Image (cartoon, helix red, strand yellow):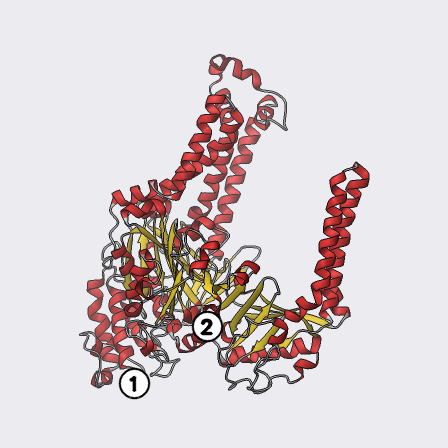
Amino acid sequence: MSAPARPAPVVSLADGEWHRLHPASPLLRGGLVFIAVLGFVIANLRERVVDFFLVVFAPETRDDLGGRYEGWQDDWANDPIGGIVTHGLVGWALLGVVVVLVVVIAAFWLSWRMHTFRVTPEAVEVRSGILFRSHRSARLDRIQGINVTRPLFARLFGTAKLEVSVAGQSANVQLAYLGSALADLLRADVLRLASGVRAEKAAAAAAAAGPVADGADATGPASAAALATEPTVQAVPGAPSEPVAPGQPARTPVASRAGALVGQRVDEFLAPELDPELAAPESVVRLPLGRVIGSTLLGASMIWMLALVGIIVVGVATRQTWLLFSFVPAAIGVVSYTWSRITKSLRYSIAGTPDGVRIGHGLLSTANQTIPPGRIHAVDVTQWVFWRPFGWWSIRINVAGTSISNANEMAQRTLVLPVGTPADVHRVLALLLPDATADVEPFVDAGLMGKGADGGYAAAPRRGAWLRPFSWHRIGWAAASGVALIRRGALVRSLTLVPLARMQSVALSVGPIDRWLRLAGVRLHTVAGPVSAVLPIVDRGEAERLFERLAEEAVDRAASDTTHHWGATGHEPPVASSTPETPRPTVAADQTGADHVG
Amino acid sequence: MPEHDGAATEHDRVAPEPGGGQFGGDVDSGFAGPAEAGPSDEWRRVSPKYVMVEVIGSLIGMVVFVGAALVVHFLWQQQWALWAAAVIGVVSIIGIAFEPRRVRSIQYRLRADDLVFRRGIMFQRQVAVPYGRMQLVDITRGPVARALGLADLKFVTAAAATAVTVPGLPMEEADRLRDELVALAETRRAGL
């Protein structure tokens, strides 16, 4: 299935050379458009097309068609098919269709020829286009996430789509489509390169092991090669106790930890990343089917559904057909949304890997998203009022680089936990905020269910009830270990967590009523996404202290944050480098826990 | 614009004021707040000439809407349009009367690690942007502002909600501030 341009056994796609995509990719990409066009034509001209074929190929059925057949008229504008039939241009029309098809297929083939990509240690680059060439390059250290999706159609061909999201609107680099196993390999390679691990030898060894389809075979030669190339590194003292560590190469003597990381990465590369279907990492959350269906049925979309059904019933009862016509499509939309939500929540898994959080879901079309460490800008744990009796929560995040234009896709990517129990919430938060888990943990339960000064939150003053009569007692904030926690909402309970290392700016706003009540609102600005971190009501003086504190801590945290090269040894001084597993030393690391204004 | 002649050379080690926000107080007196630090770390105002830009903008808006309402009134004999015109006119004139005070409320301050911007008299807003978060600095000049030698300076971060635009800076001041901010952002570069 490999492209003719390169030798048959594909070693690794991340070798800095230009590669082509899977040969079936134009069909898979264009196929969807083609089907959409076909669907449009059929939806609009269904009866006409059926009649047309009956008339052309089975003239004897004319009589059965009876009255409908009277409709063939010489009216090009309203009825092009009727026009074709009445003018006897059927042959020409079919020829035209064939020509269009041939042209489309030729264009597909050309676009496949011209669509190449390469992965260098600095960037992922894609060249595409026939007439208008485009060359898009995504810097590896700006990668916000990697998604491997396998739409049903593509799965049939054994292919997958790999999407590298970088910050910026629709700045994503898409590799659609690659062979399924190749996509997983490439993801691992890109993440390894992006992590900043400077061990080309390991990369080479791993790459050499790449062509072997199953990981078990490859371990031997890879470590052998590593041993052969860098024998001295084994003597580095103080290497972590992982069994793989001594055998792994490292560029510099100080990089023994990097050696361990590389070892981990090579292991990861060889074992679970190779084929998540075969060796999925342990998911920390299980979603029972009953909960998925129940939560969807009790979700907010159900309200819409019921409202729409009500309107339609009224429409039928009162014979207002326009009601039907205007609301039936909306009802269909809600049903399809509900259905897609259920199917996408099936086989849901979330797990931590050394290269970030991996979230997978989908039954027929599967999607697999990897968010490297330090890419999560805000986390929102919410509970819609109907979910309250069951204790269900969902988690959404803000990450840079999700496209706002594609709302559906964005909603899917940013929904990290579709529905889960508080225990699930704890586990997922531990994955999302690995550095601050221990300090944030005690605030979570009070943030989810508590009110007032529960659990060490700084509560909103009572006079806030004038502005927020229902939720004022829920509104409160806390801060721990560089994470700001905002608790709010009565109908839709919500706990928002913002890692200050990635907060963009902070705003304090005071309206006329706020001023009269000596209140203020504080808003933490993060990259665009479904989460908005707003503390609607705070005491005025406290708000100003909070503002100053957030502004100051954001600077400190950002300065000490090294997660963009989470495995780096070469770019940062060794002291400053930190792995996702170890809490990084920061200015305020010791004053956490009860770290809030009471 | 005599306030911002000391164009921020040693902003690096300037300690922020203790307690920080005199934001709560009267906006006019806020400028004279305790500035024991260097010359750069103090509230700076935009050029008073910016009042003209705002007034002309308001007047144009008023003329357009009042004119439209009057046209509706005279062509279609709609009584409500006359009232609408009157209301728009009165509101605009009140707005224009407050314009000098609103412009005075626009202040910014270069602190050691972040820029603080605030504005508003009824709806006050104060934003702190760390220099390292800046994605780009944008200078725009409208026709009226250009005639007065003014420019708007906009900071763009990865968050659209940041929305910090310092309007009405004298052109050379805007250029200098831009260079200064770019340099500051470079030394304090943070990830996204």
Q: In the image, what residue occupies the spot 40% across and 39% down?
A: A303
For label 2, the residue is A545
| Residue A472 visible here | yes
For label 1, the residue is A254
Numbered badge on residue A500: none
Number of callouts in the render?
A: 2
User: Callout 1: 10 Å neighbours few (<14), some, many (20+)?
Assistant: some
In this view, B36 is above or below B109: below
In this view, A497 is above or below B29: above
Secondary element under disc 1, as helix, strand or loop, is loop
User: Callout 2: 10 Å neighbours few (<14), some, many (20+)?
Assistant: some
| Residue type, label 1 | Val
The percent position of residue A305, horizontal first and vertical second, equals 41, 36
Q: Quadrant of residue A456?
A: bottom left
Q: In the image, what residue occupies the spot 76% across and 58% down?
A: B59
Q: Chain of mark 2?
A: A
The percent position of residue A347, horizontal first and vertical second, equals 27, 49
Mark 1 or mark 2: whose residue is earlier in sequence: 1
Q: In the image, what residue occupies the spot 52% across and 79% down?
A: B186
Query: Where, quadrant-wise, is the C terminus of chain A in this rendering?
Result: bottom left
